[in-house]
């Protein structure tokens, strides 16, 4: 059986907090909320932030959300929340075969963008980390956010999932 815990990173830099490369945020436009923001961050991902101290999963979400969720057992709880909210973009590992990916992305997302190559995430002090151990993708749950990805000039391939629940 394929597991739901697809975003676990196993390397010498294993930790819970990795920052999105700032060029990705700039390319996608302004976000209203980052519910998974680091406590200490060298740049803002959105106008408003919840940190681990706030428990962003249980708080009210408003506006356009940027979601780089914890990579591990909780990932798909966050993805389900964004699927319900329907306004925003998530950055996760492209583990397309997992049950969680099938349930919260293939069945509910508007589009998936697969990056060309692997990303380098950042440490909370702003220094660049090593190359990720897995490919990454952006997940959109709205037409507006898919359009932002399409016009972003990020390098990769955008797949439209119109019809949403295509895997009944």
Image (cartoon, grey):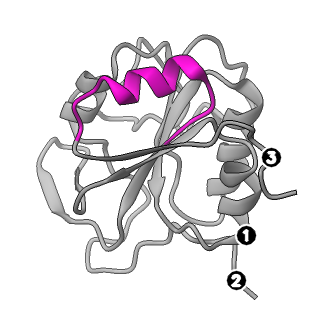
90 sits to left or right of 27 = right
140 sits to left or right of 44 = right
First to last magenta residue range: 139-154
Reading the image, the residue beneath label 1 is 99
Q: Secondary structure at mark 1?
A: helix
Q: Earlier in the sequence, mark 3 or mark 1?
A: 1
Is 42 or 168 nearer to us in this picture?
168
Rendered location of residue 104, percent (x, y) = 72, 51
Q: Which mark is residue 2?
A: 2
Rendered location of residue 30, percent (x, y) = 37, 13
45 sits to left or right of 42 = right
Q: Secondary structure at mark 3?
A: loop
Q: Pointer 3 and pointer 1: residues touching (CB < 8 Å)? A: no
Is residue 48 one of those drawn in magenta? no
Identify which residue is drawn at 44% across, 21% down. 147
Q: CA distance from mark 3 to mark 1?
A: 14 Å
Within 10 Å of disc 2 (Cα), the crowding (few <14, some 14-19, many 20+) is: few
Q: CA distance from mark 1 to mark 2?
A: 6 Å
Within 10 Å of disc 1 (Cα), the crowding (few <14, some 14-19, many 20+) is: some
Rendered location of residue 63, percent (x, y) = 59, 11
63 sits to left or right of 37 = right
Quadrant the C terminus occupies: bottom right
Q: Which mark is residue 49?
A: none
């Amino acid at each position: 059986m394929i597991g739901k815990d697809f975003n676990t990173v196993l390397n010498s830099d294993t930790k819970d907090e990795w920052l999105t490369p700032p060029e990705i945020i700039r390319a996608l436009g302004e976000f209203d909320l980052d519910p998974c923001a680091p406590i200490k961050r060298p740049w803002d991902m959105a106008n408003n932030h919840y940190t681990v101290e706030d428990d962003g999963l249980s708080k009210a979400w408003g506006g356009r959300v940027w979601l780089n969720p914890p990579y591990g057992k909780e990932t798909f709880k966050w993805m389900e929340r964004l699927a319900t909210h329907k306004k925003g973009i998530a950055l996760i590992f492209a583990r397309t075969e997992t049950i969680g990916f099938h349930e919260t992305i293939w069945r509910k997302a508007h589009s998936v963008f697969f990056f060309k190559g692997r990303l380098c995430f950042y440490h909370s002090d702003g220094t660049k980390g090593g190359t990720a151990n897995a490919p990454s993708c952006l997940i959109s749950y709205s037409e507006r956010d898919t359009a932002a990805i399409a016009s972003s000039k990020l390098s990769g391939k955008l797949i439209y999932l119109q019809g949403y629940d295509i895997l009944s």
